[in-house]
Image (cartoon, rainbow, N blue to C red):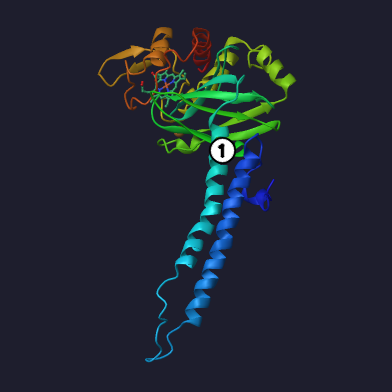
Amino acid sequence: MLPRLFASFWMPESASTVSDEVDAIYFFILYLCAFFFVGIVAATVYFALKYKRRGNDDKTSPVDHNSRLEFWWSVLPSIPLVVMFVWGFQHWLTIQIPPANTLDLRVTARQWSWQFDYPREGIVNDQLVVPVNTPVKLVMTSTDVLHAFFVPEFRVKQDVVPGRYSVVWFEATKVGTFNVFCAEYCGKDHSRMITRVVVKSAEDYAAWVEKGGIEGNPDPVTLGGIFVKRYGCTQCHSDDGSGNTGPTLKGLYGKQEKFTDGTSGVVDDNYIVESILNPGAKVVEGFAPRMPSFKGKIKDKHVTAIIEFIKSLK
Ligand code: HEC
Ligand SMILES: [Cu+2]
């Protein structure tokens, strides 16, 4: 590989099968440009001084062009350009086209959280947990605005677009935890739209799947607490009475609530289910209708656990 010079403080760790080559292309272009920048500036300064007009009768050269020179100074620099293009394009294809036999996961991005679904394993998580040395394909969509999935250590970044699916794949080469950022400005809490990708060894991943992605054997309230985090509810709702984009869940159950259409109602199981599946139906006074619908995105079992959790927040 080409030099990964300075990589340690310029670049995040390299942790996927494509990242070393992305860096190599980056440094190739960078050093090539640096080399020509220095050369061109030096030549400009040299010629400016050498052919400086020295007085009124200092005539300019009678030569107005030189076809052979012009031909070569056009052709030679285009060679590294072709190298840049061919190398870059080939690697871009590698990054774009997923290999066969990937682990396929679904990703839902919303203001301002990530949801990862494991369709075969029946797991929903707010963190992306994957096995090491296994190609993973993410089929991603957004429920609201443009977002972008970005893992710097993997050197992969892909827009997540409402109303359609976009695909990104990667193969992690190191066990560890890396940041997932949203790389498309998406509103007030864009900067908080961060999660992790946890790369586990094959055995640890299998054990995690075996337990449904949940450690231990928690009771429904604890389980509900896990799911409000996993579905990203906690991005907008606190459980301790503090304010946020949405009303706090503390003391919510049994409360008399006023809605923006002038009606009011008591918070019970039905109301919570409606709030989750059809949040626009009743909008709490003093709040904007910012909550995304979780219809088709949340399992009934998980809703039940969330209700138990909300009930417990007296
Ligand atoms: C993007 C921010 C956001 C997310 C994510 C979100 N909510 Fe909300 N939620 C709101 C807002 C804003 C309101 C108040 C407006 C309304 O009623 O639609 C609300 C209202 C509610 C209410 C009614 C509260 C009341 O005081 O009557 C419940 C219950 C609720 N959300 C539960 C959830 C659950 C459970 C989740 C996760 C599955 C969730 N929310 C995810 C923003 C959010
Ligand atoms: Cu975003």
Q: Position of residue 129 (x, y in %)?
A: 63, 24
Q: Position of residue 41 (x, y in %)?
A: 52, 69
Query: Which type of secondary structure does the marked residue at label 1 adopt?
Result: helix
**Mark 1: is the Cβ under 8 angstroms from ligand 2?**
no
So how many labels did they put on this image?
A: 1
| Quadrant of the image where one finds ligand 2 | top left
Q: Is residue 125 above or below residue 182?
A: above
Q: Dot 1, how many residues are within 10 Å of its Cα: few (below 14), some (14-19), or many (20+)? A: few
Q: Position of residue 1 (x, y in %)?
A: 69, 45
Residue annotated with mark 1? 90
Q: Position of residue 251 (x, y in %)?
A: 46, 19
- Would you say residue 239 is visible in this rendering? no
Q: Quadrant of residue 280?
A: top left
Residue occupying the point 60% across, 15% down: 222
Residue occupying the point 54% across, 53% down: 79
Viewer-nearest residue: 293 or 119: 119
Tell me if 118 is positioned left or right of 140 in this view.
Answer: right
Q: Is residue 58 above or below residue 153?
A: below
Viewer-nearest residue: 44 or 286: 44
Q: Quadrant of residue 209?
A: top right
In the displayed orientation, state which residue is furthest to the right: 203
Viewer-nearest residue: 191 or 132: 132
Q: Type of residue at label 1?
A: Gln
Residue occupying the point 71% across, 30% down: 175
Q: Is residue 13 above or below residue 131?
A: below
- Would you say residue 176 is visible in this rendering? yes
In the displayed orientation, state which residue is furthest to the front: 68
